[in-house]
DNA sequence: CATATTTTGTGAGATATCTCATATAAAGTA
DNA sequence: TACTTTATATGAGATATCTCACAAAATATG
């Protein structure tokens, strides 16, 4: 995590992510800009952060260590969103690890000086409620989907959402993780789609052959 | 949903559920008490509620209709918690159905008169943030559990948590729903526990024979 | 360039879970 | 009481998904 001292970039990011709108007082002068390269941790497990972060560009994910030692991926964040807000709101909570997936830019407000003001700012609290609500809703929808539909439907939807000119090329290990299934199973399902003639495999990519069929498969997954 | 005009009960419930602590102004005189019998809806799908509810006694569940017409159970609420708070915070959201599972008591604040005040009350917003955070966290943990552990482990934990003098007697259809598995599968897993000698079946109940074995099974499920 | 490491791909066999059909028992109701 | 509905129970057969072991390809590193 590196402090970025590029004032014009800082201004630009504050603007494009509507950062200042999240507060009723002006945090423009005290928000520091940080860059976290892909793979690095924004918050380390168990280490209470000193800042309230706002992810203004990039993506991150949240982990949790289970009692059996396994590490579970529990949420994805994409900009814009707060990070470390739960630690601000309830200070008794275990601190979970948050890791950048892409190179990410974060606006950071020092808690030491701002904590009290934040906890009394209706504007900030309101937008936090809204964001938490949205996050919760999105998670719930994802949970339901995972529980309700087999991978083949979810994968079809994913393919249509992330294809680039009819081509899918991804880190499949990450895709498997994203869906919460084993890598092996993901490949089985890709193979099934190829088998059915909906996709063609080409080196490490898959090419869409029958978009209508994929749409049919993904139709169910929509939750409105 | 019936208005309950029992002033002493209303006072008692306000007290036992710390209702008044959720606001910085006094809502004591305007909060109405309602009773919703088990099975009845507190909020109907698509019908924007006129109150901010606070479940002070009882349990409820939240549904969502999928695009294919299926109805998915997406969350359980137990007292104390707000109901209808998302509709207050972001008024663009689809309204989901909330149904009482047990006879439930709700304190209700008319939104028409209180909306603005609530949205500007840091005390209320703070506790809402906290509750949303907790709810989200709990959901996430449940989700991870469902995804990570087979039913036999989760069921063992459930049995130990809900047994009464070593006896389990439940509406199994609801238990299946709670775990997000089919009724059939739930019975298979109960049968497996009997087969292994951890439980004994007695009419419609199961009796714990080997608590240590159940503890062993449920050990993994803890997420810290 | 050669070797080590990571990512990708495949097979085999097991387990978890589902759907559907059907039967019985229990509980509510005319 | 007879009838209807709801909860409980079980079998059969299918599907979704996992684990593990291993092979091949790609990428990084000395």
Image: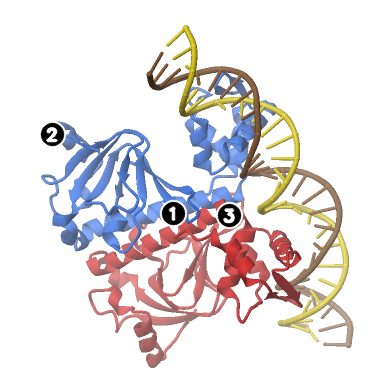
Chain colours: A blue, B red, C yellow, D brown
Calculate the distance from the C-alpha at mark 2 to the C-alpha at mark 1.
36 Å
Check the image and report above or below for D25 versus B42: above
Q: Quadrant of residue B158?
A: bottom right
Q: Position of residue A200 (x, y in %)?
A: 62, 22
- Residue name at image x 17 percent, y 36 percent: A10
In this figure, which residue is indicated by the disc labeled 2?
A7
Calculate the distance from the C-alpha at mark 3 to the C-alpha at mark 2.
49 Å
Residue B87: in sight, yes or no?
no
Q: Quadrant of residue A189?
A: top right
In this figure, which residue is indicated by the disc labeled 3?
B149
> What chain letter is assigned to the residue under label 3?
B
User: Residue A137, which numbered label?
Assistant: 1
The residue carrying pointer 2 sits among few (fewer than 14), some (14 to 19) or many (20 or more) residues within 10 Å by Cα, namely few
Which is more N-terminal, label 1 or label 2? 2
The residue closer to the viewer here, B95 or A66, is A66
The residue carrying pointer 1 sits among few (fewer than 14), some (14 to 19) or many (20 or more) residues within 10 Å by Cα, namely some
Q: Mark 2–mark 1 contact, CB under 8 Å? A: no
> What chain letter is assigned to the residue under label 1?
A
Q: Quadrant of residue B204?
A: bottom right
- Residue name at image x 42 percent, y 58 percent: B136
Judged from the image, the secondary structure of the residue bearing numbered disc 1 is: helix
Check the image and report above or below for A26 versus B133: above
Q: Position of residue A70 (x, y in %)?
A: 49, 49
Foreground label between 3 and 2: 3
The residue closer to the viewer here, C2 or C11, is C2
The lab-note entry on whether marks 2 and 1 share a chain reads: yes
Q: Position of residue A60 (x, y in %)?
A: 36, 41
């Amino acid at each position: 995590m590196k402090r970025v001292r590029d004032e014009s970039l800082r201004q630009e990011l504050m603007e494009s992510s509507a950062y200042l709108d999240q507060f009723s007082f002006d945090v423009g002068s005290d928000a520091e800009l940080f860059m976290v390269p892909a793979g690095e941790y924004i918050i380390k497990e168990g280490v209470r952060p000193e800042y309230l972060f706002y992810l203004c560009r990039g993506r991150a994910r949240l982990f949790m260590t289970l009692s059996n030692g396994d590490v579970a991926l529990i949420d994805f964040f994409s900009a814009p969103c707060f990070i470390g807000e739960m630690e601000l709101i309830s200070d008794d909570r275990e601190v979970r690890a948050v890791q950048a997936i892409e190179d990410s830019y974060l606006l950071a407000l020092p808690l030491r000086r701002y904590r009290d003001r934040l906890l009394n700012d209706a504007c900030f609290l309101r937008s936090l409620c809204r964001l938490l609500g949205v996050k919760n809703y999105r998670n719930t929808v994802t949970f339901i989907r995972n529980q309700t539909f087999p991978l083949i439907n979810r994968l079809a939807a994913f393919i249509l959402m992330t294809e680039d000119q009819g081509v899918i090329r991804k880190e499949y290990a990450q895709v498997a993780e994203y869906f919460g299934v084993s890598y092996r199973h993901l490949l089985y399902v890709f193979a099934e789609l190829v088998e059915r003639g909906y996709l063609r495999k080409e080196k490490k990519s898959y090419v869409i052959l029958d978009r209508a069929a994929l749409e049919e498969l993904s139709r169910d997954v929509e939750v409105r």
